[in-house]
Image: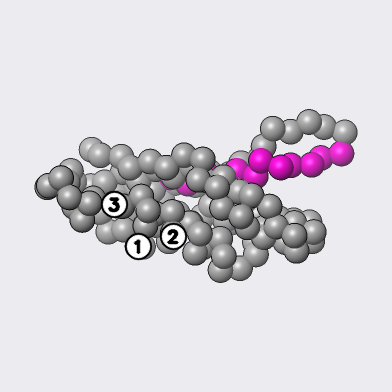
Amino acid sequence: MIRVELHGLEVYGYHGVEEHERRDGQPFLFDIELELGEEPVSDRIGSTVDYRAVAEVVRRVSDERPLQLLESLAARVADALLADFAAAAVVRVRARKPKVHIEGFTVGFSAAAVERRR
């Protein structure tokens, strides 16, 4: 099994429960894992999943429309990755919001994780 991973991919998005989050935007961090059904047959980028293309899918999904929930964002990214990359048997997406404000608390980040299987 081969796993292609991107960790800490930062995409600026307009998601959140609060209206100002959807209006002003904020950075989101994505951790992406794709398990490939088969090993690449050559040492060429065309025989595997190009992580540059993975990053573009994440950006495209984030830019499509504002969402309230991290869970929804992670699920949409996972579904798009599975749809766009036939070589992926399993896709895992973790979406993190690093700038969380909860009155009276210190929060490092909030996150939601989704796994999809073919």
Looking at the rendered structure, the kind of residue marked 2 is Val
Pinpoint residue 79: horizontal percent, then vertical percent: 44, 59
Pinpoint residue 47: horizontal percent, then vertical percent: 18, 52
Looking at the rendered structure, the kind of residue marked 3 is Val
**Mark 2 touching mark 3, by CB under 8 A?**
no
Residue 96 on the magenta span: yes
Instruction: Give the camera-side residue of 86 and 26.
Output: 26
Residue 37 on the magenta span: no
In which quarter of the view is residue 112 placed? top right
Residue 84 badge:
1
Say whether disc 2 or disc 1 marks the residue closer to the N-terminus. Answer: 2
Q: Look at the picture and state if 111 lies above or below 58.
A: above
Q: Nearer the viewer, mark 2 or mark 1?
A: 2
Identified at 60% across, 43% down, the residue is 96
Reading the image, the residue beneath label 2 is 57
C-alpha gap between disc 2 and disc 3: 12 Å
Identified at 67% across, 37% down, the residue is 109
**Which image quarter holds the C terminus?**
bottom left
Identified at 69% across, 32% down, the residue is 108
Say whether disc 2 or disc 3 marks the residue closer to the N-terminus. Answer: 3
Pinpoint residue 94: horizontal percent, then vertical percent: 52, 43
**Mark 1 touching mark 3, by CB under 8 A?**
no
C-alpha gap between disc 2 and disc 1: 8 Å
Label 3 Cα crowd, 10 Å radius (few <14 / some 14-19 / many 20+)? many
Residue 95 badge:
none
Relative to 59, is 106 on the left or the right? right
Q: Which residues are magenta?
A: 92-103
Relative to 114, is 27 on the left or the right? right
